[in-house]
Image (cartoon, rainbow, N blue to C red):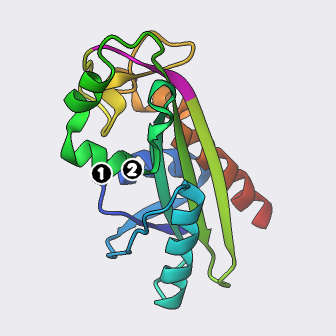
Amino acid sequence: MNINLVTSNSGKVEELSSILEPFGHSASQLNVECPEIQTSTLEEVVDFGLDWLASKNVQTPLIIDDAGVFVEALKNFPGVYSRYVYDTIGLSGILRQMEGVDNRAATFRCVLGLILDDGSKRKFVGECKGNLIHEMKGTGGFGYDPIFVPEGYDKTFSELSSEDKNKVSHRGSAMKKLIKFLSELK
C-alpha cells in the first residue's frame, strides 16, 4: 500500500519510509498546508488535523503525526510546543533552560493519525523515555535528536543508525502499531 505522509519535514518522511518499506508499504510526501491548532495534547492536534484533511478530500490513505519532547524538570515543557520552541530558541535554548538541573528525564511522544480510503480514522501512540544530555552530539536525525539519549543507550538519537533509532523511538513505536493494524486489514 502506498501511504501519503502529510508533512513538510523531509526527516520525518525518511524516517517513516524506512519503517514502512520492509513491510511492503511505500510512502510519498504530501505537502499540504494543514493548520495546527494550539492545544494541550498531541492527540487533540492530530484529531483536528485528521478532521480537517478529511473535509478537504485529500488523497488517502494518509498519515499525519504530531510529536514532542516532554521534559520532566520543566513540567513536561515543551511538549506540544516542541516545534515552536525548537524554531525560536533552538536546542541551545533548551540546554540553557536545563543548566544546573540534575533531573534530565524526558519522554518523546508521538501520535500518528491515519485516514484510510474508506474515510475511517485511527490513531497510534508511541513513546520513548530517556534523558537530555548537556551538549549536542551527533549529526543524524532531526529536531531534538542531538540532545536526547534513549533509556538503555549511551548515544543520542543523532548518533544512532536510523535502524537502531527506529527500534526504540517514539515514532518507531507508533509505526509498529500502525503496521500491525495494516497487516490485519489484509
Q: Quadrant of the N terminus?
A: bottom right
The residue carrying mark 1 is: 84
Residue 36 in picture, x, y percent from top left = 40, 68
> Is residue 47 in sight in this rendering?
yes
Residue 102 in picture, x, y percent from top left = 43, 9
In the foreground, 134 or 61: 134
Tell me which secondary structure the magenta stretch mostly adopts: strand
In the foreground, 70 or 183: 70
Q: Amino acid at mark 2?
A: Tyr
The residue carrying mark 2 is: 81
Q: Amino acid at mark 1?
A: Tyr
Give the magenta range: 129-134
Q: Quadrant of the C terminus?
A: bottom right
In the foreground, 162 or 156: 156
Above or below residue 75? Residue 138 is above
For label 2, count other residues whose C-alpha is less than 10 Å away and answer few (under 14), some (14-19) or many (20+): some
Above or below residue 91? Residue 84 is below
> Quarter-wise, where is residue 35 in the image?
bottom left
> Is residue 186 in sight in this rendering?
no
Say which residue appears at 25% left-offset and 20% top-offset. Answer: 136
Total of numbered circles in the picture?
Answer: 2
Q: Is residue 140 magenta?
A: no
Above or below residue 2? Residue 41 is above
Disc ID at residue 109? none
Does 154 sit left or right of 185 as displayed? left
Tell whether label 1 touches label 2 (CB within 8 Å): yes
Say which residue appears at 79% left-offset and 60% top-offset. Answer: 184
